[in-house]
Amino acid sequence: MSKEKKFLTCDGNQAAAHVSYMFSEVAAIYPITPSSTMAEYVDEWSAAGRKNIFGETVLVQEMQSEGGAAGAVHGSLQAGALTTTYTASQGLLLMIPNMYKIAGELLPCVFHVSARTLASHALSIFGDHQDVMSCRQTGFAMLAEGSVQEVMDLAGVAHLSTIKSRVPFINFFDGFRTSHEIQKIETMDQDDLAPLVDHEALSEFRARALNPQNPVARGMAENSDVFFQHRESCNEYYNRVPEIVEAYMKEITRITGREYGLFNYYGDPEADRVIIAMGSVTEAAQEAIDHLRAQGEKVGLVAVHLYRPFSAKHFLAAVPKTAKRIAVLDRTKEPGANGEPLYLDVRDCFYGQADAPLIIGGRYGLASKDTTPAQIISVFENLALPTPKDHFTLGIVDDVTFTSLPPKEEIALGGEGTFEAKFYGLGADGTVGANKNSVKIIGDNTTKYCQAYFAYDSKKSGGFTCSHLRFGDTPIRSTYLVTTPNFVACHVQAYLHMYDVIRGLRKGGTFLLNTIWEGEELAKNLPNNIKKYFADNDIKVYYINATKIAQEIGLGNRTNTILQSAFFRITEVIPVDLAVEQMKKFIVKSYGKKGQDVVDKNYAAVDRGGEYKQLPVDKAWSNLEAEPAAANNDPAFINDVVRPINAQDGDLLKVSAFAGREDGTWEQGTAAYEKRGVAA
């Protein structure tokens, strides 16, 4: 079945919201990072009168807590309305009591979850699988996606399957890494999905609604004589789920041409070493596998989509018979357990088999810790050892209990012709918003694929931001931060002394600095280590005084549009005339409501983005030595822990740095050593 492809440049939350809107009659919502924008999109579309596949506008109700949202979902389902919610982390945990009821009463619904860390020794707003793993006992089926395209393709499978099976679903993907990553993807329309709804099952759901015309009692109290038997009576419903999900995945494969199964295999058909994982790491793993296979290694990956119910039959069919060694990667930690959940499930599938492969497990990526192809390669290298390390950790250095695999140097595996850019900004200076527009301009006006991811600390406004953009001629699977950029823009000159802004900038790359200095004064004020890097690596250096231009135009501290314009002019990733025309179109979209005056000021900012100059790089800079670090008498905790974290080097801290602070204790008065609201 061929149809004209429609592309959309969006993030994972928008993709999930787009599909869930089609199948929802009611959405009971309560915001929590990073799931909030799913509910915001649904609310916005409802207010604009968008229709779902039943020709209705979704009724959106914001509650006063997550428990309230889950209770409203439960009540709405019992009244016979298809109901959805969106949540994550502690918000999801507050819904667990209602989830047991929804599952026990076999009410079809989907909770869309941008999976997030749970607060333990500390709170983190970032992503891993701790929240969804805390719900695997509730009776909800669980469907996982690893990319923005997969969210678009598979979110509908959760809705279709829940209607047919009566088993409620958690549909989840990685918080921030997938929920907030912007990609150019193919869209699923109502025309694709509406014909797949099982209308007979839907009518039966409506007929079961609690209704005064047809009164029944549901959810009584039971004693020990019958509770157990009654509880076991639901087994058949769960037994049917894998086949139902598989049938709908085949329909999605037919529509999109992209192959989907409960478990997808990628790699050498005769692989001897295989990784099992779910979520966004499966995309980065594919890059690592292509790299290793090009060197003749027989390696592969099984990406898990349907995690609950876990079908051993389908799983074993996906693992190559040649696999001798398996590493299972879990994005969660269960202290005191024999291993993390996915690892234990995989081991159970092979229990009692003759010639079963050696199976080891590891933890990775807690709180959105970056997981790169180099780290995946170290997992395969560990598997090749005579005695591979079991219960390992990935991407950190554990010098206390020695769980970690040895770190490897990062490699650029984004594919031929991939252009990578990094932008350092200040929270609320507009850098992130401008880059979101830039990636949409490139995605919507060229045949290029694009990706954008925005790293910022949880303090947001006034804090550090770093935008990671990629553009290329082939789909982008790099679900990790840009470590080898072709282009770096530093929008705050003070950052030159605070952060390693040129780390990884490729030979022959380009650097753009927003600075109040000119020519020789700028050369004099640049740190020696940066000048040496420019000379050693043949970097083209440009500068612009966007701060002064913004003040002259009347934009205050909003330098974003000027610097966005400079980026398009310097890199020429798309023709400059087209870029200017599209930037002005986005200005109307972004600022039109604020009046013509604001629009005109931003138009001027686009035009003045051409006022950059090139700084000649002196070859003699190669001989410069780095300035010695200033001596201080600050406490060891400040120098050894706080300063590296403030300098965005927290990734380099080892486990031993937290000795004596295992319970999350932190010293008082550390904010005095942290410079925020950096002056130009």
Image: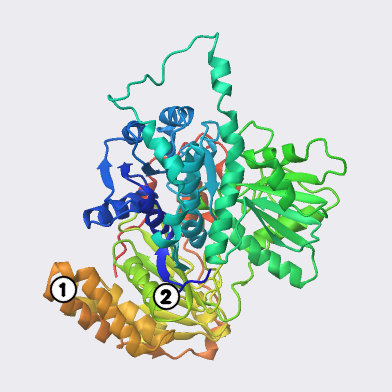
Q: Quadrant of the C terminus?
A: bottom left
For image coordinates 36% across by 44% down, the residue present is: 32
Q: Amino acid at mark 2?
A: Gly
- Depth check, front residue: 421 or 502: 421
- Pointer 2 local density, CA inside 10 Å: few below 14, some 14–19, many at least 20: many
Q: Nearer the viewer, residue 355 or 117?
A: 355
Q: Is residue 424 above or below residue 208?
A: below
Q: Position of residue 248 (x, y in %)?
A: 54, 52
**Would residue 464 be visible to someone looking at this image?**
yes
Nearest to the eye among marks 1 and 2: give it: 2
Whole-number angstrom distance, CA of label 1 to CA of label 2: 26 Å
Left or right: 564 in relation to 3: left
Q: Kindly tell me whether residue 492 is visible in this rendering.
A: no
Position above or below: 167 against 367 = above
Asked whether the residues under the numbered discs 1 and 2 touch, taking CB atoms below 8 Å apart as contact, a structural biologist would say: no
Q: In the rendering, at what x and y percent does residue 151 appear?
A: 48, 56
Q: Residue at x 63, y 40 (%)?
A: 310
What percent of the width, then of the height, locates residue 484? 56, 73
Where is residue 658 shown, x and y percent of the image? Answer: 55, 42
Mark 2 element type? helix
Q: Which residue is mark 1?
A: 598
Residue 204 position by quadrant: top left
Q: Which residue is mark 2?
A: 443
